[in-house]
Image (tube, coloured by chain):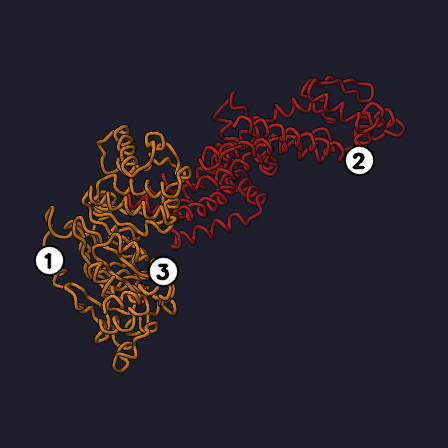
Amino acid sequence: MFAYLVKRLISGALVVTLVSIAIFLLFWFGPSSPAQTICDRETSNRCGDRIEIYEKTLGYNNPVHEEYLKWAKGVFVGRDIQIASTTYECDAPCLGVSYLTKQSVSEELASRLPATISVAVGGAFLYLLFGIPIGVAAARRRGTVADKALVSSFLFLSSIPYYLFALLTWLYLTVLWEAPFVSDTGYFPITENPAKWFGGMFLAWVALGIFGCTQYTRYTRGAMVEALSEDYIRTARAKGLREGTVVYKHGLRAALVPVVTIFGIDFGILLAGTIFTERIFDIDGIGFWSLQAVQQKDLPVVAATALFSAVLLIISNLIVDVIYSVLDPRVRLS
Amino acid sequence: MTTTPAQTRATEATYAEGEGPILAVEDLSVTFPTQDGPVTAVKGLSYTVEMGKTLGIVGESGSGKSVSSLAVLGLHDAKSSKITGSIRVAGTEVVGLSESRMRKLRGNAMSMIFQDALAALHPFYKIGDQLSEAYLVHHPSASKRDARRKAVEMLDRVGIPQPDRRVDDFPHQFSGGMRQRAMIAMGLVNDPSLLIADEPTTALDVTVQAQILDLLQDLQREFNSAVIIITHDLGVIAEMADDVLVMYAGRAVEYGTAKQILTTPEMPYTWGLLSSIPDVTASTDARLIPIPGNPPSLLSPPSGCSFHPRCAHTDKVPGDLCSTQLPDLTPASGVDHVKRCHLADPEMIYRTEILPEIAPDLVEENR
């Protein structure tokens, strides 16, 4: 188990390194010159010849591998970044400074993380809170009118594009109906005012949770239908166990394994930032931030958020594999 | 339908501990509604099992062997099946019994051993926990430690080595034979009066099969329980059964003692089953004769005798009786031996036509 974890962590680190190289090269050889962008911005579009100063200080005259190593070193020990005549201090883990705010990207990332975590935890909680019980109920009534109505209405719901669904939720509840308490969406630190935090997050959770729970209902229903048709369920009934024990202790226990696997990956994706949710409900998290960065050509931020998603996916995959081995005794990690 | 005097006596008698049959099935029918129409998997089935005796139920896949036994345990979903007739377990009528009362009998007064122990044991729970669970559900006042001790004791009884250690293993850590032993231990943990073993040896290799059958016989002697063994292997029947019920297309087609069924069968389907057993000790001249055709569809069963499309002896019955009229279960030559066949003189046909084919040396000896 321990050896397995070490092996996975090493291979994960390798993947992160490769991803960081890929992202770095994309920007280096990409069509949009960061130097041009930042020069235009700082000289109010009268850049002209001053582009050379920017290119030189940003390191675009040096070989690409030297600059990558400089960047990589900065991640571990921090570095000073010079843009034109100003030098910015960037502490480890340094992912560069934002061209827009001149703040350390990693510090900004950390400051936006609580908002994104709030969205992700609440939304994911609703995935499971609604998805699993409804899926179990549907599986137990498989083939009945209630089951068919539920499955088809959930299929309809999940066929709506998510941005439209979230936008309509926001439009109706905050603008048209002006629902009390939850209309003022956005992120307010939980440490300052928990009630306001809850109210601000509520609609984002509802939109994300209801939309996502339709998928979890389908996964759970499918896994549960399969589990309930297994021989060991018949054995459990033949023992004289109560129907609830048969369904939950024996059926759901087996059905949860695939659901947990999908959930782990989904949660990793949510933590990497929910662009539509954060944009529509005005939550200043990582998703919203990465969208702004793309629009403003703030390349260090785009690179950092891309790398952050990659790291989260790798970690969530690892966690899923470990949980899987805990849930299913037949799986041994080696 | 006709029942034998023994059956009538048995089913009319009220049950008292130690006398009368532990299980009396009478005129049992099980029907499943499907999209293509109702499928009657078991039709008018009657049999009895006494304490300490073993009934073998034989038949091909789809003949209703398992369906009828699952009905005894009340394991058919009430919404998707219709059960009529009477099943009395230790004097209690279980057809139409409430689910909560049925649950008290299941795994307690009667229990079942399933075919494929790997699939029938829960892969995520330890063997010991699965045994304890079966014990605790019928002994609510017992502590977890009692249940664990009981689980170890049962594993020891069925011949699992180092049971105090293996009790914490998961099913996949057991070998096939050990899993079936654990399954048997689970079936017997509450000392049931009736044990139904649904093809308990089918998934095992031959040497392990013999061990499991020996174990079942030992345990039956020790616990004095009634056993129903469902199989399509007449070798198992010969070793285990006191009485034999041969089923075809949901109906009993022959019912008698094991000796009667194995030595003087009177129904062509039973002949077919006997002809298709490979026997290593038989003369090399003996032929292995399969039953032609396939089991009939239960959606549209054949008219008359269900077996007539596959029967080689319909020409010996006058007219088209076989294809138009369902034969009743009528007394055969032996005592309490019944068969469902129109043949007037089956004994003669068996001796002159069937026996020389399957066991020529036996015919020689008798001469």
Quadrant of the frame with the C terminus of chain B: bottom left
Residue that numbered label 1 is attached to: B12
Mark 3 element type: loop
Name the amino acid type tagged 1: Glu
Q: Please say whether residue A305 is visible from this viewpoint.
A: no
Same chain under badges 1 and 3? The reply is: yes
- The correct choice, above or below, for B212 with respect to B86 in the image is above
Using the rendered view, name the quadrant where residue A114 is placed: top right
Q: Position of residue A274 (x, y in %)?
A: 59, 36
Task: Please count the marks in the image.
Answer: 3
Q: Please say whether residue A270 is visible from this viewpoint.
A: yes
Q: Position of residue B225 (x, y in %)?
A: 20, 46
Between A325 and B156, the one lying in front of the other is B156
Chain B image colour: orange
Using the rendered view, name the quadrant where residue A94 is placed: top right
Q: Position of residue A317 (x, y in %)?
A: 56, 34
Name the amino acid type tagged 3: Pro
The residues bearing labels 1 and 3 have C-alpha atoms spaced at a distance of 41 Å
Residue lying farthest right?
A: A49
**Residue at (74%, 26%) from the top-left corner?**
A99
Q: Chain of mark 2?
A: A
Report crowding for label 3: few under 14, some 14 to 19, many 20 or more residues within 10 A (C-alpha). Answer: some
The residues bearing labels 2 and 1 have C-alpha atoms spaced at a distance of 94 Å
Using the rendered view, name the quadrant where residue A90 is placed: top right
Residue that numbered label 3 is attached to: B278
Residue that numbered label 2 is attached to: A29
Q: Is A120 on the left-hand or right-hand side of A137?
A: right
Provide the letter of the chain coloured red. Answer: A
**Residue at (57%, 32%) from the top-left corner?**
A271
Same chain under badges 2 and 1? The reply is: no
